[in-house]
Amino acid sequence: MGLDEIVNGFPLKEEWVYLDNAATSLKHERVISAMERVLREFGVNVGRGAHPPGECATEEFERARDIVASFLGVEPECLAFTLNTTHSIHYVLASIRWKKGDAVVTTALEHHSNLAPWLRFSEVLGFEVEVVGFDRETGEVDMAELESVVDDNTRLIAITHESNALGSLQPVDEILELAEEVGAYVLLDAAQSLGHMDHDWSRYHFLAAPGHKGLLGPHGTGILYVREDVMEELELRLLGGGSTDYVTRDLEVVPREPPLSFESGTPNLPGVIGLAEGVKILEEVGLNRVERRIRKVTRRILNGLEELEGVEILAPEAERKTIVPFLVDGVDYAEVGKKLGERNICVRTGRHCASLVFERLGLDGCVRASVAFYNDIEEAERFLEVVEEIARGS
Ligand SMILES: Cc1ncc(COP(=O)(O)O)c(C=O)c1O
């Protein structure tokens, strides 16, 4: 399939300028068809049925795992399918063998899904939580503060790769280095970067990401990568059908081998097959081209907004790829989003599930435009025209 055919294969794109890609991607015709085929031809359970449709479901599920793992550059045995990023993060939380005195270090940049679980479970599981601040201009974690709180008690640094509120990329090399010095794990929340950029994902101890954003999969899909050497150190606690091998007479629970041990309950087979199709599309486009196209449209939006009187871009010095957060003087952000929506332009408004970012900026929320490779300059121009009208008060 050529690029034009791929770009024009998202049905919703016909009617909408979709700049809400940080929430979830549009779904391609091929993803929709792949899912429909599952439901029609082998919509039965995975890894359980001793019958031909069941065998087909299992084979296709494992083929999908190979496709996604190969795209990520990781071993399929280290890759589990989950329901979303949040679900993946909970697996990490429930699998580390926490000990007294452990600390989790996270940041004020996090989406609630990489913040609330640590805060809520700290007492029950017995670890301390430190929340590190960020620079308002660059949107980067405050490395000096991070270095000052990370010590031998740090068990895990849980950090986003690209802030979903400010769009800022985080200095992951330095963070990995720091974690190595004290023997801590790094959990990377790649919800906003996976599928948008070429990167070595295999370096992290844990990688949590959605299937439904940059990887072009459907809702209800996510991935969890656990580095092979880390796998042995975990004690799985989120267990059920599929992930439990057996329970002994003495009531000892014996999990299955990874990655099945991370896939409790009936999996989202149509979703996973749709996700693999999304990944195939990305591979056909090529990550370099994906990245170039995203950067070009994002740059056009940034430059255009910078020129508009009465428009303020948040974290103006951020190194960003896809996300542009902004405010329009004198117009409530929710009103800006509503007016854009009335002109068939989709953006997100509010705090984007990243309360601490806005609390620390002293703001209530903002408008967020976020780009995917299927957006183009024409769409960026249309968006800018409408923002200009809103800023002028017309
Ligand atoms: C940075 C970040 N982390 C986590 C999430 C949560 O993702 P999911 O809805 O897949 O659980 C999001 C969703 O927007 C996000 O942007």
Image: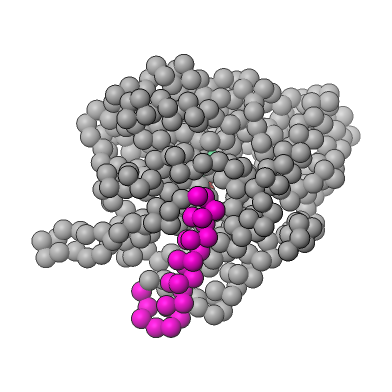
Identify which residue, 284 or 345, lies in the foreground: 284
Residue 62 among those drawn in magenta: yes
The residue drawn where x is 57% and y is 35% is 162
Query: Is residue 263 positioned above or below 161 on the image?
Result: below
Which image quarter: residue 348?
Answer: top right
Query: Is residue 227 positioned above or below 81 on the image?
Result: above
Relative to 282, 225 lies left or right:
left
Q: Which quadrant does the C terminus fall into?
A: top right
Which image quarter: residue 199?
Answer: top right
The residue drawn where x is 28% and y is 26% is 153
- Residues rendered magenta in the picture: 48-73
Q: How many marks?
A: 0
Please provide percent x and percent y for residue 159.
Answer: 47, 33
Residue 231 among those drawn in magenta: no
Relative to 292, 391 lies left or right:
right
Please provide percent x and percent y for residue 366.
Answer: 66, 32
Q: Which residue extends farthest bottom?
A: 51
Please provide percent x and percent y for residue 341.
Answer: 76, 46
Q: Which quadrant does the N terminus fall into?
A: bottom right
Relative to 236, 206 lies left or right:
right
Query: Is residue 331 positioned above or below 386 on the image?
Result: above
The residue drawn where x is 41% and y is 43% is 206
The residue drawn where x is 36% and y is 81% is 50
Residue 271 in sight from this viewpoint: no
